[in-house]
Image (cartoon, rainbow, N blue to C red):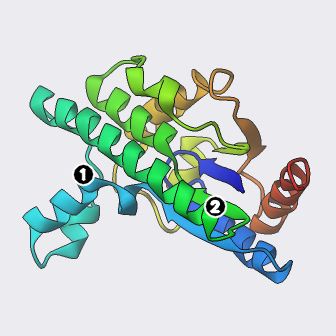
């Protein structure tokens, strides 16, 4: 079973590309499990409980947090990692060919780093399963802010997150794809990278 992850700043086209990739793999007769790190995470489930009926409030990006909240997020990430490892074992037994991860633990780590206000190495990094293919969709924040649907966090947030990602490209083995191109060209490049790990 192959693990393919797509990371990038908000508005870079992660969900669009992973949906295209899922459709493509299913059309090739592959069993695919779609995974979304934020939806899966316990922190998100807690936010939903706190917001009650207001589902949109739970989805809003966290751009500020006190030290307790940051430490809680770090702790919950360990629980999420344990749950993810159990999930992958079950999927392997069930005969899945691919896990497609819309964002990954890498994105969660960089969210914590953003809240810290610095690039910090977290102990959990060494225990995160290495993807067979880790894609980083690279696009300039200015271009994202020119689009019709803009992320709610603003340009400064996107610029800081972009810098945090750039500092981890080599360490985390990201394959970088230029996400300033049109949807179809980006997807063609995605398929090329996928061919490199296909069994």
Q: Describe residue 178's horizontal placement relative to residue 99 as left or right.
A: right
Q: Which mark is residue 78?
A: none
| Placement of the C terminus among the 4 image quadrants | bottom right
Residue at image position (28%, 33%) is 74
| Placement of the N terminus among the 4 image quadrants | bottom right
Answer with mark 1 or mark 2, whichever residue precedes in sequence.
1
Question: Would you place residue 166 above or below residue 62 in this image?
Answer: above
Q: Describe residue 133's horizontal placement relative to residue 153 as left or right.
A: right
Question: Would you place residue 130 above or below residue 97 in this image?
Answer: above
- The residue that mark 2 highlights is 92
In front here: 146 or 152? 152
Q: Position of residue 149 (x, y in %)?
A: 48, 67
In front here: 171 or 78? 78
Marks counted in the figure total 2
Q: Residues within 10 Å of mark 1 (few under 14, many from 20)?
A: some
Question: Would you place residue 86 above or below residue 113 in this image?
Answer: below
Q: Residues within 10 Å of mark 2 (few under 14, many from 20)?
A: some
- The residue that mark 1 highlights is 43
Closest to the camera, between mark 1 and mark 2, is: 2
- Inspect this view and state whether residue 196 appears: yes
Q: Describe residue 84's horizontal placement relative to residue 139 as left or right.
A: left
Residue at image position (29%, 63%) is 59
Q: Position of residue 109 (x, y in %)?
A: 41, 34
Circles 1 and 2: CB atoms closer than 8 Å:
no
- Inspect this view and state whether residue 154 appears: no
Residue at image position (45%, 60%) is 150
Q: Position of residue 195 (x, y in %)?
A: 91, 55
Cα distance in 3D space between marks 1 and 2: 26 Å
Residue that sits furthest to the front in the current view:
93
């Amino acid at each position: 079973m192959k693990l393919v992850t797509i990371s990038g700043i908000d508005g870079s086209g992660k969900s669009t590309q992973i949906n295209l990739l899922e459709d493509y793999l299913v059309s090739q007769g592959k069993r695919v499990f779609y995974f979304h790190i934020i939806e899966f995470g316990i922190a998100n489930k807690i936010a939903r409980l706190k917001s009650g009926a207001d589902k949109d409030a739970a989805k809003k990006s966290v751009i500020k947090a006190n030290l307790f909240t940051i430490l809680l997020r770090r702790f919950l990430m360990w629980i999420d990692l344990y749950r993810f490892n159990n999930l992958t074992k079950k999927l392997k037994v069930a005969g899945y060919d691919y896990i497609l991860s819309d964002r990954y633990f890498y994105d969660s780590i960089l969210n914590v780093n953003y809240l810290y206000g610095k690039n910090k190495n977290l102990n959990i990094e060494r225990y995160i399963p290495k993807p067979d293919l880790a894609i980083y969709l690279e696009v300039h924040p200015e271009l994202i802010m020119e689009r019709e649907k803009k992320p709610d966090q603003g340009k400064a947030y996107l610029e800081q997150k972009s810098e945090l990602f750039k500092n981890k490209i080599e360490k985390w083995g990201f394959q970088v794809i230029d996400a300033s191109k049109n949807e179809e060209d980006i997807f063609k490049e995605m398929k090329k990278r996928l061919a490199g790990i296909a069994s």
